[in-house]
């Protein structure tokens, strides 16, 4: 899993619809030692690659060990959890370990 440093600035920015140029933020909240978190990362990558949607999201991994403040801010208690933050609001949430079909269903409104 990758690390995440500048995410707090990305989340704090709330563009207006007229000035919005960035793709929604796709966040995977996980734990460094969690196999389920790593598998969910693979499922998300699979869904984005299969549907040719790499540019549809700004994908970030938030590790509890590195950013417990973001777990608190987004009321995430279980890892893994997937969130879509669009226009400064959480628009979709998937809590726990799920198969790629559930990830694809969650992301469907933003996929091509």
Image (cartoon, grey):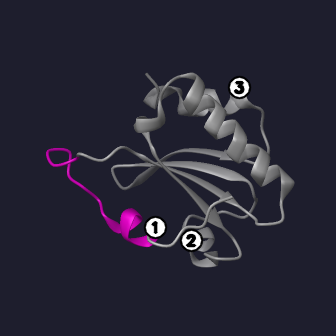
**The one of 20 and 94 positioned closer to us in this rendering:** 20
Magenta-tinted stretch: 8-20
**Marks 1 and 3, Cα distance to the nearest angstrom?**
27 Å
Give the residue displayed 69% in from the left and 58% down from the top: 1
Element class at badge 2:
helix
**N-term mark: 3 or 2:** 2
Q: Is residue 111 left or right of residue 50?
A: left
Residue depth check, mark 1 versus mark 2: number of the one nearer the observer:
1
Residue that label 2 marks: 70
Residue that label 1 marks: 7
Mark 1 neighbour density, 10 Å: few (under 14) some (14–19) many (20 or more): some
Location of residue 42 by image quarter: top right
Residue depth check, mark 1 versus mark 3: number of the one nearer the observer:
1
Element class at badge 1:
helix
Q: Is residue 10 left or right of residue 32?
A: left
**Residue 101 bears which disc, if any?**
3
Q: Position of residue 5 (x, y in %)?
A: 50, 73
Mark 2 neighbour density, 10 Å: few (under 14) some (14–19) many (20 or more): some
Q: Is residue 85 left or right of residue 75?
A: left
Against 16, residue 74 (above or below) is: below
Against 56, residue 31 (above or below) is: below
Q: Quadrant of the C terminus?
A: top left
**Residue 16 bears which disc, if any?**
none
Q: Position of residue 68 (x, y in %)?
A: 64, 76
């Amino acid at each position: 899993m990758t690390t995440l440093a500048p995410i707090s600035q990305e989340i704090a920015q709330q563009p207006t619809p007229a000035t919005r140029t960035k793709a929604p933020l796709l966040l995977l909240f996980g734990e460094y030692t969690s196999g389920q978190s790593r598998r969910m990362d693979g499922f998300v990558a699979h869904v984005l690659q299969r549907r040719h949607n790499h540019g549809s999201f700004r994908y970030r991994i938030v590790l509890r060990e590195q950013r417990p403040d973001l777990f608190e801010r987004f009321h995430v208690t279980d890892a893994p959890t997937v969130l879509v933050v669009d226009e400064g609001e959480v628009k979709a949430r998937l809590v726990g370990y799920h198969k790629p079909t559930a990830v694809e269903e969650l992301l469907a409104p933003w996929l091509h």
